[in-house]
Amino acid sequence: MDTAGWTDTHAHLADAGLLSKLPSLLAQSVVYGVKRILCVAVDADSLDTIDTVYREWEQIQTAKPLVFNSVGIHPNHAQQEKPGDWEKVCDRVTDKRVCALGETGLDKYWDDCPFEVQLANFRRHWALSRQTGLPVIIHSRDCDVPMLELLRAEYRNGPLRGVMHSFCSSYEVATECIAMGLYISFSGMLTYKKNDSLRHTASRLPIDRLLVETDAPYLSPEPKRNARPNEPAYVAYTGRVLAELHARSESQMASTTTTNALRLFERMV
Ligand SMILES: [Zn+2]
């Protein structure tokens, strides 16, 4: 399998600001060496917009990255869930373009949704992961303690398949997550000047568990920090920093993180 090039493992292509300029954004991704993009869902309605992403993607006849997607419900969207939404998520898992569940998880920063609702929402994604073998894309914000508690409980059912997305927590949290089977994905936050401790963490983690992402339209990396929206092409800037931290060339780090992504997201071929 061809593992050359970057894989943006987390981009919200269905976001209105990205969808409105999808052809140019995908062309720019090719220029930056991005070969694969995982388009991440946030709720049941986003699945319909993701269908629009694919319809547009199919129209493009020039070189373009491969696009895959996830299905799931974000903790900040769990409160707005309508009857039938979860069934819609479950119905989509057999779609061959679906290679992950999420994003889902826990968020105490925005506090948009009662924590009990978030916990129940997160747990049912794990049940679905065990049923389907699909990995879980995990959002964790200001939640290290309850996150680790829940993951440890799930781990009693066997190794976890998934990724801590846009990781910004400690080395200790990362190593425990890795020990339970998870991957660690770094976003543009890895490039921010103030984040020396995050870079120090990233430099000490096993290279075969690392992924890169943009979380576009958010978290534009240096030197595009002021770019709005962020876009998948810029995953190369985060990848460059990760390459330096692990004393690899950019092309080696692109290939390594893509190999890791293909191992985790088995349907991403
Ligand atoms: Zn996201």
Image: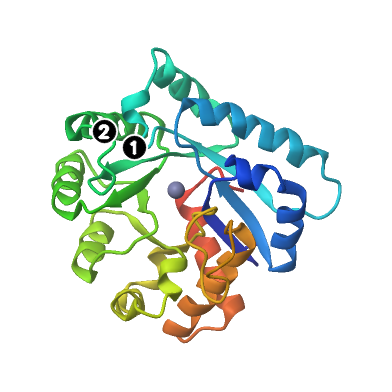
In the rendered structure, find residue 63 and report the number of the disc placed on it. Answer: none
Pointers 1 and 2 in contact (CB under 8 A)?
yes
Residue type, numbered disc 1: Asn
Provide the secondary structure element on which disc 2 rests.
loop
Residue at point 85% right, 52% down?
62
The answer to whether one can see residue 246 in this image is no
In the rendered structure, find residue 113 and report the number of the disc placed on it. Answer: 2
Is 147 drawn above or below residue 255 in the view shown? above
**Residue ID for mark 1:** 76
- Mark 2: few, some, or many residues within 10 Å (few <14, many ≥20)? some
Instruction: Using residue 220 as the reference point, say whether residue 116 is left or right of it.
Output: left
Residue at point 63% right, 54% down?
36
- Mark 1: few, some, or many residues within 10 Å (few <14, many ≥20)? many
User: In the rendered image, which quarter is residue 28 located in?
Assistant: bottom right
Q: Nearer the viewer, residue 51 or 206?
A: 51
**CB at disc 2 and ligand 1 closer than 8 Å:** no
Q: Name the outermost residue toward the top.
A: 83
Residue type, numbered disc 2: Cys
Is 94 drawn above or below residue 175 in the view shown? above
